[in-house]
């Protein structure tokens, strides 16, 4: 049996009266890895935040389903429990909650009452993941993301991903600010999860990441829509030629979104 399919249908999103997403259609089957690329300000992070239920974003049209269930009808915490995970472009710092406590309660929130992970098992799994991702063990006892360097925050997102084992992850610029070794470690963590129960949407600006994590499909976002879809070769072409040829092909002059029209 394969994992949960994420279906995004004609999604329109506004923020403070500005139309940001203007009809996004995208289906990611369980087990598939997709990448979204696209110039700055074209709506990529908005898509991630809207799916996860960020309160500032108003969905004015469209649907999102995970495994056939209506995601937009769910509360934010229900979305996580349903198996959705968001690795944010700018992870928040949470003072007063240690990384370890945060991870344990996140794991338990996806389990039934009475079926919580034992402390021993949790520590064992966390230690293994910390080792795998080459993260200093002391980090787990620090407040979540507080004072973490950019790269440490990103590794921490992958630590969460490995322990939570969601069905569908959206990773927003998980490669930004990573040095070469960290990029390899983070990619190794994501690849380790690859099986038919785990699907992933990777938002990135750089083909470099896709050298380590081969996507099944690559999408380009402009003007708050997916304007082109291809295979890994599309990312390679973007790396060498930029976006102008797509703008020309699609008759797009201004690729960004969100301006009053
Ligand atoms: N909270 C907000 N308030 C006002 N405008 C916003 C807000 N969030 C996003 N926008 C606007 O929506 C547009 C799309 O932003 P978004 O963050 O989705 O772009 P992006 O494609 O992720 O860009 P980048 O590649 O730079 O991360 C931008 O013009 C942005 O200013
Ligand atoms: Mg963004």
Image: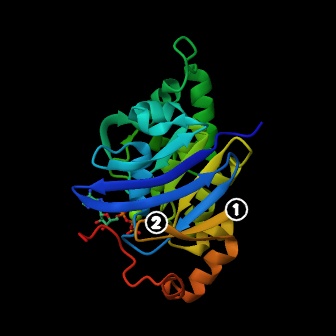
Q: Residue furthest top?
A: 114
CB at mark 1 closer than 8 A to ligand 1? no
Q: Residue at x 62, y 67 (%)?
A: 218
Q: Residue at x 30, y 55 (%)?
A: 14
Residue annotated with mark 1: 216
Q: In the image, which disc is placed on residue 107?
A: none
Crowding near the residue tagged with mark 2, few <14, some 14–19, many ≥20 C-alpha atoms within 10 Å: many
Q: Quadrant of ligand 2?
A: bottom left
Whether residue 175 sits left or right of residue 197 in the image: it is left
Q: In terms of secondary structure, where does tag 2 sit?
A: strand
From mark 2 to mark 1, how far is it between C-alphas?
19 Å
- Between 181 and 240, the one nearer to me in the picture: 240
**Can see residue 150?**
no
Residue 4 appears in which quarter of the rendering?
A: top right
Q: Which quarter of the image is occupied by the C terminus?
A: bottom left
Q: Tell me where residue 215 appears, x and y as whole percent.
A: 67, 63
Residue position for label 2: 225
């Amino acid at each position: 049996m394969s994992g949960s399919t994420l279906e995004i249908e004609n999604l329109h999103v506004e923020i403070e009266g500005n139309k940001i997403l203007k009809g996004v259609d995208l289906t990611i089957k369980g087990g598939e890895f997709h990448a979204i690329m696209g110039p700055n300000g074209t709506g990529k992070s908005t898509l991630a935040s809207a799916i996860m239920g960020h309160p500032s974003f108003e969905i004015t049209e469209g649907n999102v389903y995970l495994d056939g269930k209506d995601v937009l009808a769910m509360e934010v915490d229900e979305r996580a429990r349903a198996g959705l995970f968001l690795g944010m472009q700018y992870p928040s710092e949470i003072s007063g909650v240690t990384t370890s406590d945060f991870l344990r309660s996140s794991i338990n929130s996806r389990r039934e009452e009475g079926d919580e992970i034992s402390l021993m098992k949790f520590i064992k799994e966390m230690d293994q993941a910390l080792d795998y991702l080459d993260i200093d063990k002391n980090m787990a006892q620090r407040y979540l993301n507080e004072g973490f360097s950019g790269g440490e925050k990103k590794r921490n997102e992958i630590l969460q991903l490995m322990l939570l084992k969601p069905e569908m992850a959206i990773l927003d610029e998980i490669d930004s600010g990573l040095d070469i070794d960290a990029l390899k470690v983070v990619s190794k963590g994501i690849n380790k999860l690859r099986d038919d129960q785990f699907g992933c949407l990777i938002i990135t600006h750089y083909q470099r990441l896709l050298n380590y994590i081969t996507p099944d499909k690559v999408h380009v976002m402009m003007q708050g829509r997916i304007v082109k879809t291809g295979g890994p070769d599309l990312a390679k072409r973007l790396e060498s030629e930029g976006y102008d040829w797509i703008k020309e092909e699609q008759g797009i002059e201004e690729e960004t979104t969100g301006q009053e029209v």
